[in-house]
Amino acid sequence: MGRTPPVADNHGHVNPVKGLGPREVARRFRRTGGWFMGVVALLTWDLDLRPGDLNDVDRLYRLTIESARVIQGEGVRSVAIIGLHPAECVRLIETGWGLDKVRGYMVKAIDLAAQYIKRGEAVGIGEVGRPHWDVGSDVVKLCNEVIEYALTVAKDLGAVVHLHLERAGEATVKSIVDIVNKVGVRDRGKVILHHASPGMVKPGVENGLTPSVPIGRHGEFEEAIRQSRLIVVESDYIDDPRRPGAVIPPWRILSRVNQLLQLGVVNEDDITSIMVDRIEELYGVKYS
Ligand SMILES: [Zn+2]
């Protein structure tokens, strides 16, 4: 390529309390071709906040929005995606909350996110969804109701939704398509299948959804890109020094892209499409 390929991270986290924080992550990412980062809310307890407290959810959202601003200040275009992870749901149930109470709480957390989106401080809801581990059917039902509510709110706002799901290929996609149809989502591309497995790519794209593939997963990414090129990629970096090897950090995406280019897994046009065109469409940002 001769020049540095543009690098975008559709879904990553930064932890201003316990991790490197937004400034350092942005500087490293910027030095390695990074031009865009979707900053997604962590879990409340990752930031020493209390699950089940809406005031702390508000703090979580504000810290996420502030992180995106700091990243942007370092020369990396950045947007905030705010919401409550399904693990919060499970945690509240474990501490004895009834399902109705949890549902009401998750709805309020989405309503709170909507206020920030309306003011233009955040662009989407996430990550919301279902646990990727086995839970009872009553919890799955509750999570599906939360997904439906999030998609309804996002539809009215024209916002993106980052969905955290189990990775069961076509079955996972079909269950989401059912909810998308029920809600009548108009811009289906704004429904993002975060951490998509290779088996979710083709059915996702065929149904107009956007798979976000973890580029750090060797073998998996190669398999995913063979299914479709209409994807975005993510680091899913969690900025947790205690779990350094969990995923690749955003600043390693460039070397991975160069490797994939050298191996001929992708070409320059693919990279432009994935790293620039799709991101511009999704978030209304401009690469320059
Ligand atoms: Zn994530």
Image: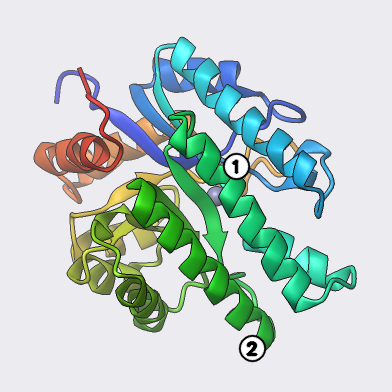
Relative to residue 263, is residue 93 drawn left or right?
right
The Cα atoms of the two marked residues, 2 and 1, are separated by 26 Å
User: Could you say where residue 6 lies in the image, as x and y percent from the top left?
Assistant: 25, 27
Front-lying residue, 180 or 119:
119
Relative to residue 44, is residue 40 drawn left or right?
left
Q: Residue furthest left?
A: 269
Query: Residue beneath label 2, please?
Result: 137
User: Could you say where residue 195 lies in the image, as x and y percent from the top left?
Assistant: 45, 58
Query: Residue beneath label 1, please?
Result: 41
Task: Say what amino acid the circle numbered 2 marks.
Answer: Ser
Q: Is residue 140 above or below residue 104?
A: below
Is the residue marked by circle 1 packed among few (<14), some (14-19), or many (20+) residues within 10 Å? Answer: many
Q: Which residue is found at the position 53% from the left and 75% from the top?
A: 144
Q: Is residue 45 above or below residue 208?
A: above
Quadrant that contains the N terminus: top left
Q: Tell whether label 1 touches label 2 (CB within 8 Å).
A: no
